[in-house]
Image (tube, rainbow, N blue to C red):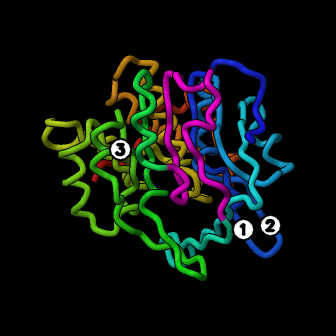
């Protein structure tokens, strides 16, 4: 049975596991798409609900202060170890929480203006995307493109139900590092209504169905570069919320999301998720803060 907050309508629904990210033998931090994206949407002004599964985590309530959380109790919280020492991320998964289904979701959350599907480890069925006909649906499908061996070492796999996800979602956001074969990006671009490919320090490319060449949005330059963890999740939430609030201005949404994501790189963990007023200041100075195009 889910631990449910007091019934209340929301603007932005996150579906996916919150995680414990192991930093070393002694230190851990809360993470996951649901955590980073929920805090981003909340800080940008949305009323946010998270439907997730985890063991009891004392720090979760403090971190997600101001966010409504419906938790499906599990024996373990999903736990990742991220290693960037090689210059690219290598992930190990230590434990996985329970599956998430549509029937578990609070009825008053099912028609949220924005629904963000953020699977991390196959905890959602792609078919759930068809259950929100009144919502702007955004998908960050990395968890459908991830498998792991008996030692927990994560590897990239094909998104088995990509055709359905690309056809049904309003927006699909991926990193160029999410796909093992980069040629799949052009294939997906031809199927998706909107496909956003984040390119790290190079910004992002936005492909629109029938739109030909992608629109490139350069990155905003962070003040310092400390830790890239969560940047893609922050980008996705900022893009989706701006897109919904602006009535579909996807080009400005891409620029805005790059601006928001530039902050999270400057600090470790969720402490890097920025406040709206800080983003607005950097946005106003944007012409001097953009990274040169490719």
According to the picture, the residue beneath numbered tag 2 turns out to be: 27
What residue sits 27% from the left and 49% below the top?
A: 163
According to the picture, the residue beneath numbered tag 3 turns out to be: 218
What residue sits 65% from the left and 37% below the top?
A: 50
Mark 1–mark 2 Cα distance, whole angstroms, equals 5 Å
In the current view of this chain or complex, which residue is farthest to the right?
A: 58
According to the picture, the residue beneath numbered tag 1 turns out to be: 23
Give how far across and how far down residue 246 sits, in percent. 41, 18
Between 221 and 48, the one lying in front of the other is 48
Q: Quadrant of residue 25?
A: bottom right
Between 181 and 246, the one lying in front of the other is 181
Q: Quarter holding the C terminus? A: bottom left
Q: Dot 2, crowdedness within 10 Å: few (<14), some or many (≥20)?
A: few
Give how far across and how far down residue 51 sits, in percent. 64, 39
What residue sits 78% from the left and 46% below the top?
A: 60
Callouts 1 and 2 close, C-beta under 8 Å: yes
Earlier along the polypeptide chain: callout 3 or callout 2? 2
Q: Quadrant of residue 172?
A: top left
Residue stretch rendered in magenta on the structure:
96-124
């Amino acid at each position: 049975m889910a631990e449910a907050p007091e019934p209340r309508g929301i603007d932005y629904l996150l579906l996916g596991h919150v995680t414990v990210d192991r930093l070393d033998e002694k230190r851990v931090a809360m993470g996951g798409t649901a955590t980073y994206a929920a805090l981003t949407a909340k800080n940008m002004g949305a009323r946010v609900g998270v439907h997730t599964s985890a063991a009891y985590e004392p720090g979760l309530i403090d971190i997600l202060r101001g966010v409504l959380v419906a938790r499906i109790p599990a024996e373990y919280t999903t736990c990742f170890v991220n290693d960037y020492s090689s210059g690219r991320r290598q992930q190990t998964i230590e434990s996985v929480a329970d599956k998430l289904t549509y029937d578990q979701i609070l009825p008053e959350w099912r028609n949220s203006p924005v629904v963000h599907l953020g699977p991390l480890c196959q905890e959602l069925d792609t078919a759930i995307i068809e259950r929100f006909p009144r919502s702007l649906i955004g998908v960050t499908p990395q968890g459908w493109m991830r498998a792991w061996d008996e030692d927990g070492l994560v590897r990239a796999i094909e998104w088995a139900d990509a055709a359905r996800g690309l056809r049904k979602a309003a927006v699909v956001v991926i990193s160029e590092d999410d796909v093992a074969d980069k040629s799949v990006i052009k294939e997906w671009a031809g199927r998706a209504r909107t496909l956003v490919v984040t390119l790290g320090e190079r910004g992002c490319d936005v492909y629109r169905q029938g739109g030909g060449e992608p629109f490139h949005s350069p990155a905003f330059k962070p003040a310092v570069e400390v830790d890239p963890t969560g940047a893609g999740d922050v980008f996705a939430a900022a893009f989706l919320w701006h897109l919904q609030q602006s009535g579909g201005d996807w080009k400005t949404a891409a620029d805005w999301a790059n601006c928001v994501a530039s902050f999270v790189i400057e600090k470790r963990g969720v402490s890097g998720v920025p406040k709206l007023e800080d983003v607005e200041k950097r946005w106003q100075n944007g012409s001097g803060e953009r990274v040169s195009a490719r």
